[in-house]
Amino acid sequence: MTVGTRKNYYSVFFCLFFSPFIYGMNNDIVIEEISSGSLDAEKKLFVEGFSKSYKALNKTIQSSAQKLPENITGGGFKDEIEAFNARKSGGYFLRAKSEERVVGYASFEKTDVDSEVYIRQLIVDQDFERMGIGKQLCFDSIFKLLPDTKHIVVIARRANSKGVNFYEKLGFKECDYMHEGYSPELYIGLEYFAAANK
């Protein structure tokens, strides 16, 4: 599988190895595909990141947000663990590591629509934000692992303005993509067309 190493922001080179998808960026951050083991460190990062992000909400929402890591985040990550354990074809699970510390996580999968990919989850440790890790995990990695991708979709919580802004800066636009049972008042569908943004 392809392995890329990025020593700085201006040079990228690729090598072929018989190993999982792995590449380095900024000298000490490594992006790797998770193919075995557990997602314990990724779940911890996800719950902590969710808790920190939603502390900024107003008092009314914040009081219920105190319960969210167990009720929603833990439950949401339960779906991630089930998908990871099932290892269905077309699903990808990636982590970013700084030395042995997990500092980012993303998962995405092919949909039933030709050349379309759905981003399931993305989280970056707040201490490592603005280093390009999120873009590498959920955007650049899609095109490296699935080069025929033409359309990427994601669903974000409307209250997560930082996340919505992140995707919009990458060129995602609001769309009507939504899972059954999700409220459009609470969630927003976003899409990216590869051909339109080249």
Image (spheres, rainbow, N blue to C red):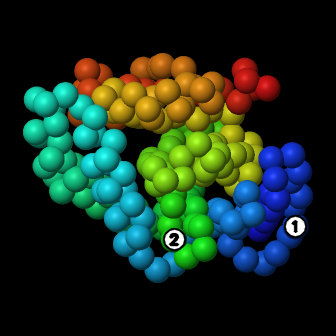
Q: Is residue 69 visible?
A: yes
Q: Quadrant of residue 29?
A: bottom right
Q: Nearer the viewer, residue 174 or 48?
A: 48
Percent across and percent down for residue 157 are 33, 33
Q: Is residue 12 left or right of residue 170?
A: right
* Residue with the most extreme front position: 127
The residue singled out by tag 1 in the image is 15
Q: Nearer the viewer, residue 1 or 40?
A: 40
For badge 2, the amino acid type reads Arg
- Residue at the image point whose x is 47% and y is 20% from the top: 175
Q: Nearer the viewer, residue 175 or 15?
A: 15
Q: Is residue 187 visible?
A: no
Quadrant of the snapshot with the C terminus: top right
- Residue at the image point whose x is 55% and y is 63% from the top: 95
Q: Is residue 114 left or right of residue 127?
A: right
Percent across and percent down for residue 101 are 51, 71
- Residue at the image point whose x is 89% and y is 51% from the top: 11
Percent across and percent down for residue 179 are 34, 35
For badge 1, the amino acid type reads Cys
Looking at the image, tell me whether mark 1 or mark 2 is earlier in sequence order.
1
The residue singled out by tag 2 in the image is 101
Query: Which circle, 1 or 2, is nearer the viewer?
Result: 2
